[in-house]
Image: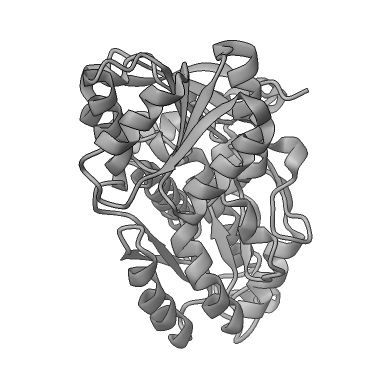
Amino acid sequence: MRRNYVRALGAVGLAAAMLAAAGCQDSGGGSEAGGDGKCGGKIAIFGAFTGPNAGLVIPSLNGAKLAVKQHNEKNPNCKVELKEFDTTGDATQATPVANQVAQDQSFTSVIGGHFSGETKATMPIYEAAGLVMVSPSATATELTATGNKALHRVVGNDGTQGAAAVAYLKNVLKPQKAFLIDDGTPYGAGIISEVKKGLGAQVAGEDKVQTDQTNFDATISKIKSSGADAIAYGGYTNEAAPLLKQARAAGITAKFLGFDGLYDPQFPAGAGAAAEGAIVTCPCLPPAEAGGTFSADYQKEYGQAPGSYGAEGYDGAAVLLEGYKAGKNTRKDLMDWVNAYDKQGVSKYIKFDETGDVDKSKVVIWAYEIKGGQITPQQEINLS
């Protein structure tokens, strides 16, 4: 289902329009600028920009970089710097980054985390420093259930995605029994918990895998013993690809469903023919569904269509950039700006509730299918 705003705006170009709004009132920031009167600022962005799961994050990083580039071209007197911090998605690497950014007063906002584990680990640091966080892709439900005031996310949480996956399993895959696997991370364990609640008696068995695990004989044996005709996997590519490859080699033909952690070109590449027909759900839009000229702009900039969370990465940056253009240049100003944000983005309408979650009524979940080694949009999952 295409969003109505996409049709309505057409060639007008929502992506360009979002960043063309009036900003500072004169070349020096004028009376509209906050803090010391200067327009612009410095954003820290952190996530798995390298490593085995980077393919899931790079489109979001590129979306944010595109938004900043467009902003700076349109607002030469209100430049914003985007500083990248590569954590490989590891919470132990993200924590010292958070301490560095928090202590450096030149940083006035943060994009991230991209993974739930690194986000959970760094939220208290950023909150204590008064730094607003806008995450494009950290989906663990627990992140916005703790009362943390720093974190906001432009993506739906795993409560919504888990419910969508259950609906897809029951209405499309229609298994008799399902075997559930997670990688023990806040993200993987959290979303499988949601699926378990939804499937109830259809769950035939469960298992956990470890980060960097390479041999999955024990899990494969449990799947066989369970008699399951579907597998739901919560985790990331690094473990999912070899697991699925080994399961197929062992003769397991059960349908395979993963979540947004597998919306990564390295998943079908790593699993090879074993990934054919696998389903991946994601609260992220296919490129053709994004608003305005975003997809065309991204294609022109990077020579390829935006992948997972490309539009959400753009939106996460745009929320902050519009604050800088409005003269908000202190940590408090930008926290207040994001809390009050209420505007259409390229991925969805963006307005945050009191927990920092984006309006749940605007969240859309898609099912993607691996076809010919490519992650291909299949259908929007209807939760009504």
Q: Is 94 placed left or right of 12 in the picture?
A: left
> Does residue 81 lie above or below 14 as drawn?
below
Quarter holding the C terminus is top right
Could you tell me which residue is drawn at 68 percent across and 63 percent down? 338
Q: How is the image coloured?
A: one colour
Residue 34 location in percent, x, y?
66, 79
Could you tell me which residue is drawn at 61 percent across and 55 percent down? 319
Number of callouts in the render?
0
Could you tell me which residue is drawn at 32 percent across and 30 percent down? 220
> Does residue 249 lie above or below 119 as drawn?
above
> Residue 20: in sight, yes or no?
yes
Q: Is 3 placed left or right of 120 in the picture?
A: right
Residue 383 location in percent, x, y?
72, 25
Q: Nearer the viewer, residue 155 or 21?
A: 155
> Does residue 186 lie above or below 364 as drawn?
below
Quarter holding the N terminus is top right
Residue 344 location in percent, x, y?
69, 41
Could you tell me which residue is drawn at 57 percent across and 77 percent down? 124
Image quarter for residue 193?
top right
Q: Is 26 placed left or right of 240 in the picture?
A: right
Q: Is 105 placed left or right of 248 in the picture?
A: right
Residue 11 location in percent, x, y?
57, 24
Q: Nearer the viewer, residue 315 or 282?
A: 282
Single out the residue that lies furthest toward the front: 225
> Residue 156: in sight, yes or no?
no
